[in-house]
Image (cartoon, rainbow, N blue to C red):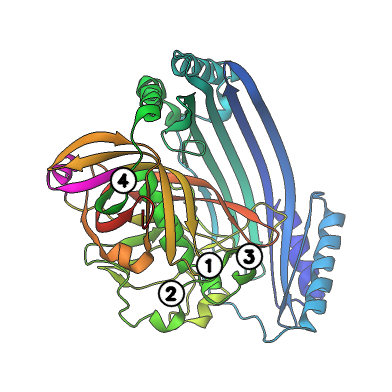
């Protein structure tokens, strides 16, 4: 593939490009789904293609091709140059990139078992066993289990001299039980909603998730939800379980710290951010003193864990919020120059070879505290424990939000008591994080995968993870406001 990369870089240089890069990507995926005792989906795909970026006359040009051969690589590069020349006639200012080191490297996701070497029969047999457990009660109308595997083999070369080869592997699995009865419908999912848990690792993840061991509990909780009272409304101390807190981090920390969104480049599709540039370096209080939120492209198992991003920038770790103070953005080589820091922290990624790389959420985690979960519950007088996301809504500035969860439990005088259905909570991002007064310790900390984050026009899907342990937030509005 190196020869193909050199053709693109030489063609771009000869046609006047001051910068060029090429990503050649071989992608292999497998998705399996079992629904009510039948295989509803067995899908395997393999693709190969190249995406080429150039800067000519201070403007970007991009073109891609699914025909990776010398002639087509040269033609596609020439097209990218033509697009850049056209873009330059409308530019407001020249594109400038941060200076970066030159790398020649091979990086691969660590794994124990190649998921693509495990037989279709073994995977389906496990999902069928789960399905039989979930459907032992006639109130369960839909039992849905799934597995998903992805391998991306990428070659990235830049006109600055970097040549990086990466093999990125991801596995995921989960299930849900939908129950209907007594005039109501409820759902319980495991290990998380919307497909389960996803990690950058091999098939060993499937065994680690204890899927069979939790199926009876999930079935029982789904059935119990039908007769459970609706979550009450009012002000309560709120403890969020890991899967829900991970989505809270994603929506109210991850997206508002993307610098392109801050600068208005996502305004027409997915909104902007309340973390405007004057708050950077100004001791803006994002949360309480115990809130430390870290972006980390190196954490083992993270879906955004890579050796290098699509700008050929090495993966890094840094604070977005430190001791409650907002301290950093997520950047790429182009936009990092817009802030005082002036250096990319490696957040540039694209959805395959045919999309333009853009700033995407890295792995972002809430650092663990000192509490044991049982002791945190004992310390709570009047609260609610909510877990597993069901719905979410957040405004265009990432300030006002409302989340719904699959399940909740009342906490009274230090004891977890009644189950509630249809729990919701709402708040305003900085006030919510300022109300955080307790975080569980690293024994409860889990890195939760998000495989379906959408952004951009045309929309791109990216994957990332958010680590957290259950945490408590004081005096939060739960239920329907004003009811």
Disc with the residue nearer the chain's start (4 vs 1): 4
- Reply above or below: 204 against 36: below
Mark earlier in primary sequence (3, 1) = 3
- Measure the alpha-carbon separation of dots 3 and 4: 34 Å
Labelled disc at residue 396: 1
Callout 4: SS:
loop
| Residue 382 magenta | yes
The residue nearer to you, when weighing 133 against 336, is 133
The residue furthest front is: 483
Q: Is residue 241 left or right of residue 396?
A: left
**Label 3 packing within 10 angstroms: few (<14), some (14-19), many (20+):** few
Sooner in the amino-acid sequence: mark 2 or mark 4: 4
Residue range of the region highlighted in magenta in the rendering: 371-385
Residue 23 spot, x, y in % from top left: 67, 57
- Residue drawn at (53%, 41%), measured in percent from left and top? 169
Q: Residues within 10 Å of mark 4 (few under 14, many from 20)?
A: some
Secondary element type, mark 1: loop
Q: Position of residue 453 (x, y in %)?
A: 55, 52
Compared to residue 335, the image places residue 424 above or below, namely above
Q: Residue 96 in the image: state x and y as whole percent.
A: 61, 81
Q: Which residue is mark 2?
A: 275
Label 3 or label 4, whichever lies nearer to me, is 4
Quarter holding residue 388: top left
75 left or right, relative to 221:
right
- Point out the tag, 3 or 2, that comes first from the N-terminus: 3
Nearer the observer, disc 1 or disc 2? 1
Q: Secondary structure at mark 3?
A: helix
Q: Are marks 1 and 2 in contact (CB under 8 Å)?
A: no
């Amino acid at each position: 593939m190196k020869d193909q990369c050199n053709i693109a870089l030489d063609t771009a240089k000869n046609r006047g490009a001051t910068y060029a890069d090429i990503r050649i990507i071989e992608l292999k995926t497998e998705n399996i789904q079992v629904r009510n005792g039948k295989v509803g989906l067995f899908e395997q795909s393999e693709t190969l293609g190249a995406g080429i970026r150039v800067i000519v006359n201070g403007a970007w040009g991009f073109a891609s091709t699914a025909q990776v051969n010398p002639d087509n690589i040269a033609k596609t590069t020439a097209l990218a140059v033509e697009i850049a020349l056209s873009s330059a006639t409308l530019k407001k200012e020249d594109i400038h990139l941060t200076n970066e080191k030159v790398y020649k490297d091979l990086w691969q996701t660590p794994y124990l078992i190649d998921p693509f070497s495990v037989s279709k029969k073994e995977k389906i047999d496990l999902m069928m066993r789960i399905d039989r457990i979930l459907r032992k009660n006639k109130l369960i109308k839909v039992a849905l289990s799934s597995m998903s595997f992805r391998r991306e083999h990428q070659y990235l070369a830049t006109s600055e001299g970097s040549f990086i080869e990466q093999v990125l592997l991801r596995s995921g699995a989960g299930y849900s039980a939908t129950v209907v009865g007594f005039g109501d419908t409820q759902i319980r999912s495991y290990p998380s909603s919307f497909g389960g848990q996803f990690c950058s690792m091999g098939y060993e993840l499937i065994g680690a998730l204890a899927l069979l061991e939790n199926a009876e509990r999930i079935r029982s909780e789904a059935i119990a939800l039908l007769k459970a009272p609706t979550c009450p409304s009012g002000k309560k101390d709120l403890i969020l379980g890991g899967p829900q807190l991970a989505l809270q981090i994603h929506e109210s920390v991850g997206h508002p710290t993307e610098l392109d969104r801050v600068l208005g480049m996502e305004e027409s599709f997915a909104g902007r951010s309340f973390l405007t540039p004057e708050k950077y370096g100004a001791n803006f209080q994002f949360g309480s003193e115990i809130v430390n939120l870290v972006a980390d492209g190196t954490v083992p198992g993270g879906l955004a864990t890579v050796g290098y991003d699509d700008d050929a920038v090495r993966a890094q770790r840094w604070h977005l919020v430190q001791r409650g103070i907002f301290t950093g953005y997520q950047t790429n080589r182009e936009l990092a120059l817009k802030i005082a820091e002036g250096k990319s922290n490696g957040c540039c990624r694209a959805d395959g070879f045919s999309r333009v790389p853009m700033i995407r959420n890295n792995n972002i985690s809430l650092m663990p505290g000192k509490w044991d979960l049982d002791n945190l519950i004992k310390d709570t007088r009047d609260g609610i424990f909510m877990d597993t996301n069901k719905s979410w809504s957040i405004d265009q500035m990432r300030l006002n939000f409302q989340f719904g969860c699959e399940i909740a439990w009342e906490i009274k005088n230090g004891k977890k008591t009644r189950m509630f259905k249809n729990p919701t909570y709402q708040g305003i991002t900085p006030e919510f994080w300022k109300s955080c007064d307790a975080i569980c310790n690293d024994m409860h900390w889990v890195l939760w995968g998000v495989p379906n984050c959408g952004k951009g026009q045309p929309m791109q899907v990216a994957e990332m993870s958010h680590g957290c342990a259950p945490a408590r937030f004081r005096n939060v509005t739960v239920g329907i406001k004003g009811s």
